[in-house]
Every structure is written in structure tokens, then in C-alpha cells.
Amino acid sequence: MYLFLNSTAKTELEMQEKQLADTQKIFLELSLSFSVKPKAGEKEVSPNTFFSIWHEFSSDFKEQWKKQNKLLLQER
């Protein structure tokens, strides 16, 4: 029974490690497609760097969206 559980855990761990590696690869491809560069001293773009830039962009976009909608409503 112990051998079976150990084998199952090992298989699960290998699957999780592969998913992590795949996710890291996809994240790096995503950051390249958005032309995000690593911060000084970093080898790769970190998720914190990427998502802080994304958060700033989406916040600015939301504010502009609200302003434009307000202007459109005033014109009507």
C-alpha cells in the first residue's frame, strides 16, 4: 500500500512540476508579446512586475472609460 501511495504522489508531483514549467513558459511568452522588460537586476520579468504594470494600465483605462461615458451622456 505504501509503495502505491508513494508512486501516486511521485506521479502527481511530476505532473505539477510540468504544469509549473508550462505556466512559466507561457507567462514569459505573454510578457514578450506585451513587450514588458525585466526590471534592472532581474533576469526575467516577474509576475509582480507584469501585473503591477497591467494594474496601472487597467486602472487608467477604467478612469478614461468613465470620463468618456460621462462626456457622451452630457452630449445627449
Image (tube, rainbow, N blue to C red):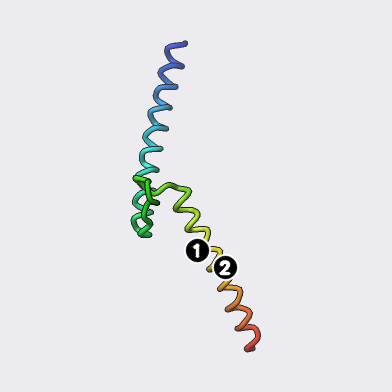
Amino acid type, callout 1: Phe
Relative side of 71 to 23, left or right = right
Res. 19 image quadrant: top left
Which residue is pictured at 65% across the width and 86% down the height?
Answer: 74
Q: Nearer the viewer, residue 36 or 26?
A: 36
Rendered position, 59 above or below 8 = below
Tell me the CA gap for discs 2 and 1. 9 Å
The earlier-in-sequence mark between 2 and 1 is: 1
Relative side of 73 to 12, left or right = right
The disc at residue 57 is: 1
Q: Are marks 2 and 1 in contact (CB under 8 Å)?
A: no
Q: Residues within 10 Å of mark 1 (few under 14, many from 20)?
A: few
Q: Residues within 10 Å of mark 2 (few under 14, many from 20)?
A: few
Residue 49 placed where, x, y %?
45, 51
Residue 52 placed where, x, y %?
50, 54
**Residue beneath disc 2:** 62
Q: Residue furthest bottom?
A: 75
Rendered position, 4 above or below 61 = above
* Helix, strand or loop for disc 1: helix
The disc at residue 43 is: none
Residue 28 placed where, x, y %?
36, 49
Which residue is pictured at 47% across the width and 58% down the height?
Answer: 53
Q: Nearer the viewer, residue 60 or 22?
A: 60
Amino acid type, callout 2: Lys
Which residue is pictured at 62% across the width and 88% down the height?
Answer: 75
Which residue is pictured at 56% across the width and 73% down the height?
Answer: 64
